[in-house]
Amino acid sequence: MFKINEIYPTILGESLYTGYPFIIVRFTGCPLRCSWCDTQYAYYEGNDYSLAGVMDEIAKFKYFNVLLTGGEPLAQNNLEKLIDQLLHKKYQIVVETSGALPVSGLAEKVHLVMDYKLPSSGMENKMMLKQNLNYLKTSDEIKFPVADKKDFNRAIEIIEESKLLDKVKIAVSPVMGKIDFSALAELILSSKMNIRLNLQIHKIIWPEISRGR
Ligand code: SF4
């Protein structure tokens, strides 16, 4: 069984797949508690689904792309079984993960977007960057949610220390309400690094709607 908070179709707001129609599967539960978490409603709230039940729900929408997110999707038992079934049905799969759990076993099957939680989150000590780097593909993404300049400077330190630009795609994403888009854009430009500004465009398209879009 899976515990799922919500399943809905939308325009994907983040990642290199931004702008494509996607079905979002948001799992319930997360082992982290980031200080600025915008999906706290997914910590406990949700319904149980069998594997066949999730597949049926996804099939209703008739789109080609599925995002598995949370919460923390990797905290679900049997996630690989769901991924295998989705692959069998030819879905393109993106998995978003917090960076606090092992990604081994998944990376070769899906497009991974792995966060690195910076100091403002209060969760940096939970990150498993070194272990997970062994499994990420060059097409996968590491995303740094940035709340302030201290976070940004720490992201640059990590990128340089671990030579991340040689290994994966890098994005920095403004934590909404904590740092202006333009301030983060200026920081990226001043760094002279080949990193992408990741805006959550679903929040720009539907500013009044916090869930289901
Ligand atoms: S990892 Fe994501 S879902 Fe979990 S607490 Fe942090 S922001 Fe929230």
Image (cartoon, rainbow, N blue to C red):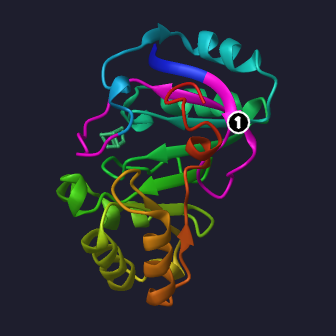
**Magenta stretch: residue 23 in it?**
yes
For the residue carrying disc 1, how many other residues have a C-alpha within 10 Å: few (<14), some (14-19), or many (20+)?
many
What secondary structure prevails in the magenta region? loop
Query: For this view, does 177 lie left or right of residue 1?
Result: left
Give the answer, above or below, for where 133 lies relative to 212.
below
Task: Inspect this view and state whether residue 54 appears.
Answer: yes
Report helix, strand or loop for mark 1.
Answer: strand
Between residue 149 and residue 116, name the one nearer to us. Answer: 149
Residue 73 quadrant: top left
Q: Which residue is mark 1?
A: 22
Q: Position of residue 213 (x, y in %)?
A: 60, 30
Q: Position of residue 210 (x, y in %)?
A: 49, 30
Give the answer, above or below, for where 11 lies relative to 170.
above
Query: For this view, does 170 lie left or right of residue 102?
Result: right
| Residue at 39% from the left image edge and 78% from the top image edge | 159
Task: Inspect this view and state whether residue 172 appears.
Answer: no
**Magenta stretch: residue 105 in it?**
no
| Residue at 59% from the left image edge and 21% from the top image edge | 7
Give the residues in magenta.
8-37
| Residue at 32% from the left image edge and 41% from the top image edge | 37
Q: Quarter containing ligand 1?
A: top left
Q: Position of residue 209 (x, y in %)?
A: 54, 29
Give the answer, above or below, for where 85 lies relative to 110.
above
Query: For this view, does 41 lie left or right of residue 1?
Result: left
Residue 38 quadrant: top left
Between residue 148 and residue 43, name the one nearer to us. Answer: 148
Amino acid at pointer 1: Phe
Give the answer, above or below, for where 19 lies relative to 54.
below
| Residue at 22% from the left image edge and 58% from the top image edge | 120
Query: For this view, does 145 lie left or right of residue 106?
Result: left
Mark 1 beta carbon near ligand 1 (under 8 Å): no
